[in-house]
Amino acid sequence: MKARKDIVKAGTKTGATLGGIVFLFFGLIPGFYFGSYGAMTVLKYLMGGPVEPTVGVRIFAAMGIVLGIASLAAVSIVVGSIAGTTIGFLAKAASEKAEVQETSAAEGKAR
């Protein structure tokens, strides 16, 4: 019984790890882009028009970049964990089905 729970936990951890790796390869640049774009869009609406490249604007853009990267990393890891957990549950169900079939076959041969 404990081994079946370990299958699901291993799937979750593996999925989170793969989600993090996928983020590093495919999510870092989009996180940078969308974070900076979002920050500049917010500033444009707050200032009422185009913004000058002052120190405050640059700091706000840097905070937006960090927020965009962190948000995309969190989404990648959570989606990877969900996928891994789903695969773990499927593996658990497959192993239970195989156990039931083996038990049925053994009972059939015993008769």
Image (cartoon, helix red, strand yellow):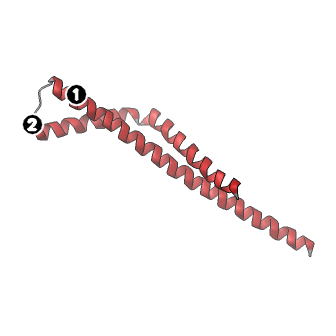
Q: Looking at the image, is 28 positioned above or below residue 94?
A: above
Residue 85 picture location, percent across and down:
56, 53
Rendered image quadrant of residue 48: top left
Residue placed at 87% from the left, 73% from the top?
108
- Tell me the quarter of the image containing the N terminus: bottom right
Mark 2 vs mark 1: which is more N-terminal? 2
Residue 58 picture location, percent across and down:
20, 26
Pointers 2 and 1 in contact (C-beta within 8 Å):
no
Rendered image quadrant of residue 4: bottom right
Residue placed at 24% from the left, 39% from the top?
38
Residue placed at 39% from the left, 33% from the top?
28
Return the residue found at the far front.
Answer: 2
- For the residue marked with disc 2, what is the amino acid? Met
Task: Answer left or right for 55 relative to 105.
Answer: left
Q: Looking at the image, is 17 positioned above or below residue 88?
A: above
What residue does disc 1 label?
A: 59
What residue does disc 2 label?
A: 47
